[in-house]
Image: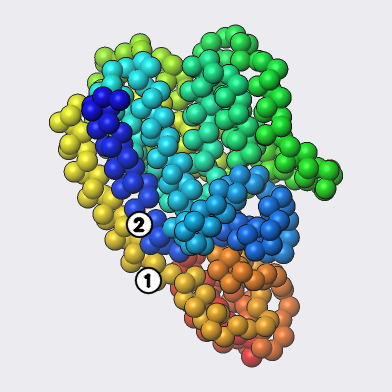
């Protein structure tokens, strides 16, 4: 390996550590999925059952297990914490940045490949999602690796990577095959040993779950969580068709000045990456339910497009602005954490350990995870019951005492005791 290559890897590693990993411990668990995933991982380690994910005393059918398995490995090495959980996403983002470098080297110069990988670390949305214990960035890594191996015609290894993508998020893990077909327009990737490997690695867990739970699992995951979400029959996150373009525009804030140059002097060597980008955007835009992190798989090709037009001088200016924005983001997260409900509630509940603790018209999965305690939902209460709910639901209650309150991403939450 030449010294220039070593420098490139070092730059990518340092930029990835800063923007994808550093400070990932500042916020306690945030989204509903983070708490659920953390609990499921912790439960696997405590019970030794690595087959059936559980959350709050019930099987968790919504997600496949690979994220939990990787999280459990991180927990074993670093202990169970926000850092070790989110490290899975941070490392996935870091490895994806290296893949962007390798991928773009197949089409562009080494210098432009480095600029592409560094551009990937400067897409603002990636800073947020690499600090979330959710499966999306792990899916992006295995999907990008699978597509890279397909383009290199390493089909057996490509099927293996896609099997891991399938174990991470389900059928969307096969999207790289669709992109490869659009570009190559042949079926050369269909090989018996690769398909067998995919079935053994990617499908065995699903077969076992269907064997254990039958139609209820098949319907819940493949039909309800995938088909119904895509078609809108299960309406959970309805968003307009322009939702993802807005997300991408926000994420590309540091590169907007390059857009006129890209349009005016388009380089045909980028055709594959342009197809990849639009295939992902169009696919997820057709879905009736949209979440911002679904679009992450469009960022590797987008960063290659930006990287081809960036200059050293522009990159230096971008890093200066990025460091300011990133610092503000970390300071903001630290301040927000001091005002949050979850850490205050967890501290109080660990000290008092109330026997009768319930959710009312609301759920805070982070508290379930931190207490490692099943908290049922309830509508009718008795004297002495403790309730976690949103402040807006207090109007439905009588004879209660507010123990503490605080802000959360989904609104103000309160802990009350029935008098």
Considering the numbered disc 2 on the image, is that residue within a helix, a strand or a loop?
A: loop
For label 2, the residue is 23
Image quadrant assignment for residue 224: top right
Q: Is residue 22 visible?
A: yes
Q: Residue 77 versus residue 163: which sits nearer the camera?
A: 77
Left or right of 351, for residue 131: left
Nearest to the eye among marks 1 and 2: give it: 2
Residue at (23, 48) in percent of width and height: 323
Q: Residue 291 versus residue 319: which sits nearer the camera?
A: 319
Residue 388 versus residue 213 in the image, above or below: below
Question: Residue 362: x percent and y percent?
Answer: 62, 66
Left or right of 14, for residue 270: right
Residue 350 versus residue 15 in the image, above or below: below
Quadrant where the N terminus lies?
top left
Residue 110: mark:
none
Mark with earlier residue (1, 2): 2
Residue at (39, 67) in percent of width and height: 337
Considering the numbered disc 1 on the image, is that residue within a helix, a strand or a loop?
A: helix
Residue 25 versus residue 199 in the image, above or below: below
For label 1, the residue is 338
Residue 12 versus residue 383 in the image, above or below: above
């Amino acid at each position: 390996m030449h010294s220039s290559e070593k420098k490139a890897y070092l730059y990518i590693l340092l930029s990835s550590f800063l923007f994808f990993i550093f400070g990932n411990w500042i916020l306690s668990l945030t989204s509903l999925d983070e708490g659920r995933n953390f609990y499921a991982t912790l439960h696997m380690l405590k019970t030794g059952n690595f087959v059936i994910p559980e959350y709050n005393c019930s099987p968790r059918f919504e997600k496949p297990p690979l994220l939990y398995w990787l999280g459990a490995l991180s927990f074993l090495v670093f202990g169970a914490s926000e850092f070790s959980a989110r490290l899975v996403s941070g490392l996935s983002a870091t490895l994806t940045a290296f893949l962007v470098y390798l991928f773009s080297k197949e089409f562009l110069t080494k210098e432009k490949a480095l600029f592409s990988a560094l551009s990937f670390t400067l897409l603002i949305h990636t800073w947020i999602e690499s600090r979330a214990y959710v499966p999306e960035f792990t899916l992006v890594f295995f999907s990008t690796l699978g597509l890279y191996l397909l383009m290199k015609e390493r089909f057996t290894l490509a099927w293996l990577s896609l099997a891991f993508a399938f174990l991470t998020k389900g059928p969307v893990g096969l999207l790289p095959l669709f992109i490869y077909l659009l570009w190559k327009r042949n079926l050369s990737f269909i090989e018996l040993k690769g398909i067998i490997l995919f079935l053994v690695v990617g499908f065995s867990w699903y077969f076992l779950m269907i064997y254990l739970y039958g139609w209820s699992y098949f319907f819940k995951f493949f039909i309800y969580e995938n088909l119904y979400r895509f078609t809108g029959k299960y309406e959970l996150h309805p968003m307009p068709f322009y939702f993802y373009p807005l997300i991408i525009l926000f994420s590309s804030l540091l590169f907007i000045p390059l857009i006129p140059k890209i349009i005016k002097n388009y380089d045909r060597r980028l055709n594959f990456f342009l197809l990849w980008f639009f295939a992902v955007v169009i696919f997820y835009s057709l879905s009736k339910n949209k979440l911002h992190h679904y679009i992450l798989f469009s960022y590797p090709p987008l960063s290659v497009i930006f990287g081809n037009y960036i200059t050293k001088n522009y990159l230096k200016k971008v890093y200066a602005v990025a460091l300011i924005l990133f610092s503000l983001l970390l300071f903001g997260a630290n301040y927000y954490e001091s005002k949050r409900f979850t850490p205050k509630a967890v501290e109080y509940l660990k000290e008092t350990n109330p026997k009768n603790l319930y959710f009312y018209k609301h759920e805070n999965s982070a508290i379930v995870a931190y207490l490692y305690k099943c908290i049922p939902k309830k509508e009718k209460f008795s004297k002495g019951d403790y309730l976690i709910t949103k402040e807006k639901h207090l109007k439905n209650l009588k004879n209660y005492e507010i123990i503490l309150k605080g802000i959360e991403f989904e609104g103000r939450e309160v802990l009350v005791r029935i008098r």
